[in-house]
Image (spheres, rainbow, N blue to C red):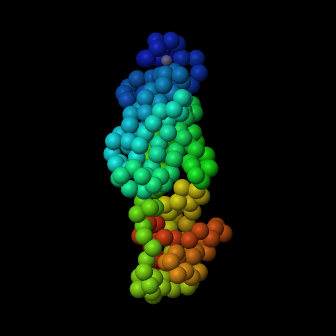
Amino acid sequence: MNVCSKCKNEITGDIYISKLNKTKILCKNCYYAETFCITMSKIMQIDKKYKNINLKIYKEKLILEIYQDNKQKDLNKKLEIEKQQDKLKVVLLPDKITKIIDIKDFEELIYIINNQKQVGIPNQKEVKLLRQKYKPGTRIELIKMYDYINPVSSGTIGSVDFIDDIGNIHMKWENGSRLSLIAGLDEFRILED
Ligand SMILES: [Zn+2]
């Protein structure tokens, strides 16, 4: 008989391993409760770590406001966060995108949002350099795309189509996606023949 180390009841369904102590087993309810506590403490850490982030609690929801700068003016994004089983339901505003993600993906989402605003538009000289380096037809392997809506998967191969006047590298990806790369934000490398 398996007994939950938290509530001491017999575990009738799936057995879960505690994330805090790998030698302990938990029932589903206790596991979800534990995950929720870990998640909440990590969200609190995010609130403390970033000066441009403000966390509020409103009814059953957490509201995370992400500002453009440290002065907490010019709201960039607003995230409405609710618990959904052992994951988070996150509504991203003003984009109106809903995501069901775990805390690791959530931390990455915050990272992406904060990085996107830091990448400025390249000047003409920088665009010229990009065009010299990434000529049409150059084969590229994607390492990581920092896009929270529908990123191209890491490891995808594509070729450069053209570079527009604000330095976006327009791509033809092998999976049919046409999402462009942003130099200085996305990670990718040229594939040599
Ligand atoms: Zn339990």
> Image quadrant of residue 124?
bottom left
Residue 185, placed above or below residue 107: below
> Residue at image x 54%, y 41%?
80
Determine whether 46 is above or below 31 in the image. below
* Quarter of the rendering containing residue 170: bottom right
Q: Residue at x 47, y 30 (%)?
A: 36
Q: How many marks?
A: 0
- Nearer the observer, 178 or 167: 167
Where residue 15 appears, x then y in whole percent? 52, 24
Of residues 79 and 32, which is closer to you in this image? 79
Q: Position of residue 87 (x, y in %)?
A: 53, 36
Using the image as rendered, state which of residue 33 and residue 111 is in the foreground. 111
In the picture shown, does residue 67 fall above or below 101?
Answer: below
Q: What percent of the width, then of the height, locates residue 134? A: 48, 82
Residue 21 visible in image: yes
Residue 87 appears in the rendering? no
In the rendered view, would you say 74 is above or below 82?
below
Question: Looking at this rendering, what residue extends furthest in the right direction?
Answer: 176
x and y, in percent, of residue 49 in the image:
33, 45
Q: Residue at x 46, y 45 (%)?
A: 65
Residue at the (42%, 80%) spot, across then down: 123
